[in-house]
Image (cartoon, rainbow, N blue to C red):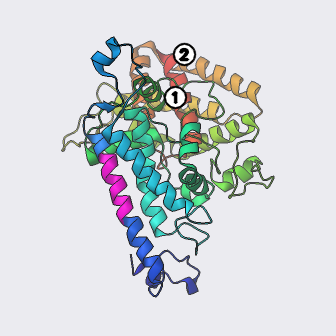
Amino acid sequence: MELLDQWHPVEDGYRQMMPAEDDSASMQRYRQLSNLERELFSWWCTLIFRPEGPGFGSPGMFGKLMGKSSEPSMSGAMSGFLECLEKVDTALTSTKGPWFFDWADHPTMIDFIYVSHVERMLASAAFWKGLDLRSDKYQQQFPALNAWLDAFEKRECYLAFKSDYYTNVKDIPPQYGPGYDGGFEDERILFQKNISGKESWSLPLSFDDELQPLYKGPPLPLCVLKAAGISGDNGELASEGTSYEKAEPEQMAEACRQMAGWKLASNGSAVAKFAARGGPKGSRNPRKGFGAELADPYAMSDERLIPAVEIALKSVCVSLLAQGGPSAHDAALNEMKENLQTQISKDEARDVASSLAYLRDRVGVPRDLPLASARQFRAHLNAAIDVLH
C-alpha cells in the first residue's frame, strides 16, 4: 500500500491514495480505520456465516404467556454488527466530505478497502437476515455511511466494479462458506424473492428496484447515457456526480434495454453456445468441478441445440433493441412471441427454455452488464422462457 503513490505519483496525474508519510495524524487514522474495517468484517462473518443465537429483548415462552410484547428480537451477532456500523458511520461523520479523509476530494485507498466488503454486506444482510441497510430506517440510523455509498455511486468508475445482490450472494458462499437464514424472517423471505429474481425479473419492470437503488448515480456508462440523450438530475447531459432519479422512465428503460441488446448482438453466437450448456446433453464436464454453484468453466454445450438457441436469442435481441417508446417495445415483444412459437419446434421448446434459464442465471454484474441493464436482459429472457413453456 505504501508504495502505491510512489508507483503512481500525483505529479504524473494520478490521485493520492495514501496519507503522506510525514502526516503522522493521517497515518494513525489510516491504521485505526484499517483495524475498524477488520472488526466490521469479523462481525459480518459472525452474523452471516454462523447460526444466530437467541435474540435480546425476546419475551420468551413465559413472557408470552404473561402477555408481554413479541416484537422482533435481535441476536447478539446482529447487535454487534450494527454497533460496529455505528462506529464506521461516526468515523465518516467526523470528516467534512463523504470520504474517510478530508485532504482528498476523491475516494482513497481506505475507502476502496471498505467498499469492497460493504457491498457484500449489503447483499448478504438483506438475503440471509432480512436487513436492508439502504432503507429509509437505516439511512436515518447511518446517514454518513449512506452518503458515502451515494458518493461512490455518483462516480462512473464505481459502475465498472459495482456488483448486484444476486451476483454477490452467489459468489459469497464459495469464498466464505454458506450463509445462515435468520434475522427478520418476513423481510428476509421478501428480499430473497427479490434478489433471486422470482418476483423482480418479470416484465413490465418497475422504474427502480425496491431493494437496490439504481439511480443514485449514473446507471449506465456515460457514453450510453449520452447516446440516449439522458441528462442527470443536475440538468447536464450524461454527467457524473449527480443522480438520475428524475429521468424519464421509458427513455431510461429503452437505454437499459438497448445496452443489453448491443452486448448480446456483439457476441451472439458465443452466447448461444454458452447457453446451450443448459440443454439435456449439455453441462457434461470431463474435468474437475467447482465449489461455486453456477461455475462450470469446462462444461460442454448441447451441440444439437445451438441453432435453436441462437434463433431464440435473436428474437430476444430484437425486443431489447426496439426503439420508439412503449408501443414499439410491445410490438417487438409480440413479434418475439410469434417468432418463438413458429421457429422453435415443440420438441425443442422446453430444452431451449432450459438453455435460456441457464444463461439468465449466469448473467453477472458488472462482468456482463450494469444492473440497470442486466435486469432488463434477465426479464426479457424470462419473457421468452414463458412463451416456450
Q: Is residue 93 above or below residue 83?
A: below
Considering the numbered disc 2 on the image, is that residue within a helix, a strand or a loop?
helix
> In the picture, residue 2 is in which quadrant?
bottom left
Residue for badge 1:
381
Q: Earlier in the sequence, mark 2 or mark 1?
A: 2
Q: Quadrant of the N terminus?
A: bottom left
Q: Which mark is residue 18?
A: none
Which stretch appears magenta? Answer: 35-45
Q: Is residue 276 left or right of residue 246?
A: left
Considering the numbered disc 1 on the image, is that residue within a helix, a strand or a loop?
helix
User: Callout 1 environment at 10 Å: few (<14), some (14 to 19), or many (20+)?
Assistant: many
Q: Residue at x 63, y 24 (%)?
A: 204
Q: Nearer the viewer, residue 113 or 261?
A: 113
Residue 192, image x and y in percent?
A: 43, 28
Circle 2 or circle 1, nearest the eye: 1
C-alpha separation, residue under disc 2 versus residue under disc 1: 15 Å
Q: Is residue 54 left or right of residue 286?
A: right
Q: How many marks?
A: 2
* Residue 138 seen: yes
* Residue type, numbered disc 2: Gln
Q: Which mark is residue 341?
A: 2
Residue 350, image x and y in percent?
A: 41, 18
